[in-house]
Image (cartoon, helix red, strand yellow):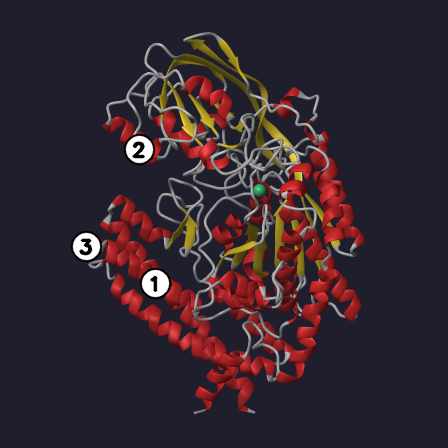
Amino acid sequence: MLLSILALGALQTPPGLDLWSEEDLEARLERDRAVCQSVTPEHLREWHDLIASRPHAAGSEGDAQVIAAIAGAFDAMGLEVEVHRFTAYLSRPVSASLRLMAPSEVELSLTEMALPGSAYSELDDDLLRLGWNAYSGSGAAEGEVVYANHGRKEDFERLAELGVDCEGRIVLARYGGNFRGYKAKFAEEAGAAGLIIFTDPKDSGYGRGLETPEGGWANCDQIQRGSLKTLPWSGDPLTPGVEATAEAARLDPGDIALPRIPVQPVGWQAAAQIMAPMRGASVPKDWQGGMPFRYRLEGGPGVRVRLEVQQERALVETANVLGTLRGTLSAEAAPGIIVGAHHDAWVYGADDPTSGTIAMLETARAITGQAKASGAAPRRTVTFAAWGAEEHGIIGSCEWVEGNRQALIEGADLYVNLDAAASGLRLGVSASPSLTSLIHGAAAAVPQPGTAPVISALDAWRGEAADLPEPGFLGGGSDHVSFLALCSIPAASISARGAPGTAYHSLYDDLTWYRRVVGEDYESARLIARITAVAVDRASTAPILPIDLGKPARALSRAARELLEAEPELFGPAGLEGVIGRAEGQAVAAEELTGRLRAAARSGALDDARCRLADELLRGLERAWLSESGLPGRPWYRNLYTAPDESSGYAAWPLPGLQKAAVDADNRIAREQVDHLGAVLQRRSGCLAALRVLVEQATER
Ligand SMILES: [Zn+2]
């Protein structure tokens, strides 16, 4: 009877507020409003000017200025500041050229021209205008051409089926469909002598809308830069598993699988000059892009190009900047709740990353402002982080995590990532399932811009759906990766998109473009900063950590069920059905315990010592996904719940050990990984039992 009343009570409380008692609820909501109020467009704009006014690629002079500016901003907020320096193996462009040799000789453009109305695009440094892909091989290649669609694994398989040989040829692939590094990897494996990656107008240009500077979509010059690194570990290429300090032991660069062939990104005008004269067979229907001619598989002997790329790879020093606000409940050195965004960019990076970086800075200002206004430190430590060298391959965050792994496993509560987070008003969240109610609650407390009558960001996100939206699975591609993969810290990536255009990784991603296309009003960044600030303020002041106990087991059973249905012969005999049954049982028990634990917490039955112990057990529940032996074939990745997939790089693999067994059709891996998931449930059930005892002891008196 008691149980059903509590369950009903939890149902009627808005999401995320069941940690506050009825008497405290009004004060909580008042504080949420104050946090929202303190986030302003004026400040967001100032942060934007501070960081995105100069080119600031990792290791450059602009990078050093941005690092100093962020350290100064954290200091002015009263945060404890650490500039965490690291030495990473980066690449930089020296020169590049692309020449059509036949049917006629034409030098093709590899740079982006200045735009009327954008002072930022008027750079006199040719290397800043040059489009390039980090970690390209150096050298020259000349030959006939092949078009490989998106350059995915299946695209190269299709070419082979169609009898098209890439050996010694220069392959053209359009952006999209996978991480660009895999285009290079698969092209190299197919024997290509070089690779040209182009932005197709159908995907990002006039096929979508008006072009920059008239509109916001890619114009004929616009070039997407970006890293090509696809190593089986994240972070610095030479120091997997350890922090890239100046004196760290390093791998021999000759021993790691970075691209050997020259790879060059181009705008669609240069691609059209090569592809229009191609004379081979027509492409399969879904390979046709948006340029005004029929795409062909091969150019034949009448179309030849010469590509030359020269780059230098070297050890380069750059830094992360951390700002810490100490909490009263957290252990002394615990990083607590971490909010991170990278600060390095390809050129100006007004959208990527800075629209996220400014939301992080504004969150820091809101949280420190609340602490000052209330005259009280938060219960949990909050750490704000601006990561370096993300664009080269998620390096700064990873090196910091590798250097602080033990402290993070013991004392990190959760991680929020804000990368290129604000380019529109359509909210999107990917997160660990245990953070669902925290995120729902924060979105419910924030008004959705442009709605009348005003609705919450949660209602706008939910749309017409009957149920609350479930956050997506976290894949690869940004700074949350090492927090999840190495430490199993629950993480969320929050963003809002939908602006009419993209300047992704191009020179044109500057303040002029951002303010014209995303908006002068900073409503997008304000939305993201408010949701993040409310989530962080609630999580840092709640009696116990706002971790959902039951959702992870539910997510496990759902993902495992899908895999079992897809591969019954593989996972049936391996005993996956048994694990699913146990996960479902655990989810039910954990959901019931969530209600009791939160009731005890909001009633004040847990003193600080018990709250501290509850937090420790809640962190332990999340760490249950760690496997020290790592994933099959990728020992660096140690989280059994999620990992980036193996051959596209961005997509998420739920239950990656099982996914690997399915990809390899390997019975031994299947059995082993099913056992590992059983052990995860076992570890979780130990934490749940201890939490149950804690609640019983606290409420017994
Ligand atoms: Zn980014």
Dot 2: few (<14), some (14–19), or many (≥20) neighbours within 10 Å?
Answer: few
Lateral position of residue 22 relative to residue 43, left or right: left
Q: Which of the two residues, 274 or 263, is positioned nearer the viewer here?
A: 274
* Three-letter code, disc 3: Glu
* Secondary element type, mark 3: helix
The residue that label 3 is drawn on is 569
Depth check, mark 3 against mark 2: the one in front is 2
Q: How far across and down, in percent of the image, does residue 619 sit?
A: 52, 65
Instruction: Work out how far the residue at label 1 is from the one at label 2, CA to CA, in angstroms.
Output: 35 Å
The quadrant of the picture showing ligand 1 is top right
Neighbourhood count class around disc 3 (C-alpha, 10 Å): few under 14, some 14–19, many 20 upward: few
Nearer the camera: disc 1 or disc 2: 2
Residue 448 spot, x, y in % from top left: 60, 61
Image quarter for residue 60?
Answer: top right
Say whether marks 3 and 2 touch (CB < 8 Å): no
- Mark 1 and mark 2 residues within 8 Å of each other at the beta carbon: no
Tag 1 near tag 3, CB within 8 Å: no
Instruction: Return the residue at label 1.
Output: 558
Determine crowd level at label 1: few under 14, some 14-19, many 20+ residues with C-alpha closer than 10 A.
some
Q: Which numbered marker is on residue 178?
A: none
Lower sequence index among marks 1 and 3:
1
Q: Amino acid at mark 2?
A: Lys
**Residue 470: percent from left, percent from top:** 45, 62
Residue behind mark 2:
285
Instruction: Establish if 483 lies above or below 250.
Output: below
Residue 218: percent from the left, percent from the top? Answer: 54, 33
Label 2 sits on a secondary structure element that is helix
In the image, what residue occupies the spot 24% across and 46% down?
665
Residue for point 53% across, 40% down? 235
Ligand 1 near label 3 (Cβ, under 8 Å)?
no
